Image (spheres, rainbow, N blue to C red):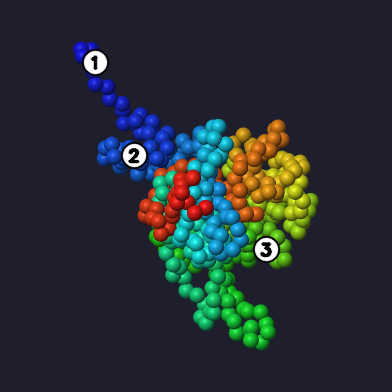
Amino acid sequence: MQGWSKFEIPDMVTMDILSKLPVKSLARFRCVCKPWSSSFRTSDFITKHHQNNLTNNNLNLLLKRCHGNTRNDIHYFSALSTEKGENFSVTENIHLPFFENCWYAPVVSGPCNGLLCLHDAGKAALWNPSTREFKILPRSSVNRPPSVDSTSFGCLGFGFDSITDDYKVVRFVTNYFDENEEEGGLADWIHQVELYSLKSDSWKEISVPEAHPYASPLFNNYVNGSYYWQATGNSDYLILSFDMANENFSTLPLPTFGGSLAQYYLQLLDFNGSLGAIVYPREGTEKSIDLWVMNGSWTRQFSIESVSGVERPLGFWKNGELFLESSNHELVLFDPATRELKNLGIHAYQNTMQLIAYVESLVPINGRSEQEEHIIRRRAGDASNRY
């Protein structure tokens, strides 16, 4: 037709539009043309895509759960819908055969830029649930002390070194020597700390801190370049941190919340880019929940008084709502403004639920696409789904 002319959108504008799309759409568009496919792999596009998701608060939800407390009761993930009106219904169940011989596996560290670190009993892997890339970390090449009888792998941290553009995993190791057990004494042990670099795909040994971390995180303990653990040192309870860039440990005090850890649970978390701590009582089904935030010193951000019929918090959602585990071990959503408690109809065995909120990311991890010997996805309601 006369009057029509070819109109071309500038490449910069095209890439800006594409950077606002979900990963699933970008995976399809890779087939459109080679320049697009190449552009999606550049660090500039990957960063812009991730920043757009952060700015728009495009959160995705995974719920780790289990239905029993024996080795036959396998932990798995449920992907929850975040579409308006769908009430966080389960869309997909994700099983991890790679970790099925481990008791509580997998422990989850992260997210960090959309990536998760999964680990247990010496096994560790990185996973991008958006691109479905999965990487098993190599066995550690760190030398163990001579004559060691057994080795156990303890707390682990995962984060990003922005100076070298590298993802790192720090892991605590305990080596045991049994010779004293024959005399009725306790086994001797030696601690080690090892650090994995994704860039080099290798482990190295680093110095052991004076404080020793304990407990598995319920929330994301990676905050602005550092990973945090609850720890013990010189008979005191404190917080141990590891800076991913300078690879140094440091300590800071727990918030003074007016009780003891024998009476209260304390869980560290990333709260809007600052280190936070949620404190709530160990006993009773009527919980008061305090949030403390570190900004040079600990300050109490807010308190939620007397929520009945709940066991523990599981994470914050948009607009300040709080996911909780109910006394009936169901996932519920609490609105502090209205004090409404909404049952979401999702069940699990007691204290096995963990909620992971992450934004989509194109960050590559030099792994392989998900394979059934490592990860199995089943649509909710699929007859072949065992759970």
**Residue 98, x across and y down, in percent:** 45, 61
- Mark 2–mark 1 Cα distance, whole angstroms, equals 30 Å
Q: In the depicted view, which residue is nearer to us: 229 or 187?
A: 187
On screen, residue 335 versus residue 176, left or right, reads right
Which residue in the protein does label 3 denote? 232
Write the residue at 76% across / 53% down.
283
First of labels 3, 2 by sequence position: 2
Judge the density around disc 1: few (<14), some (14-19), many (≥20) Cα neighbours within 10 Å. few
Residue 2 position by quadrant: top left
Quadrant that contains the N terminus: top left
Which amino acid, by three-letter code, is at mark 3?
Thr
Quarter of image, res 36? top left
Which residue is most to the left? 2
> Picture quarter containing residue 70?
bottom right
Q: Which mark is residue 28?
A: 2
Q: CA distance from mark 3 to mark 1?
A: 74 Å
Q: Nearer the viewer, mark 3 or mark 1?
A: 1
What's under tag 1, amino acid-wise?
A: Trp
Q: Secondary structure at mark 3?
A: strand
Classify mark 2: residues with Cα within 10 Å, few (<14), some (14-19) or many (20+).
Answer: few
Q: Label 2 sits on what residue type?
A: Arg
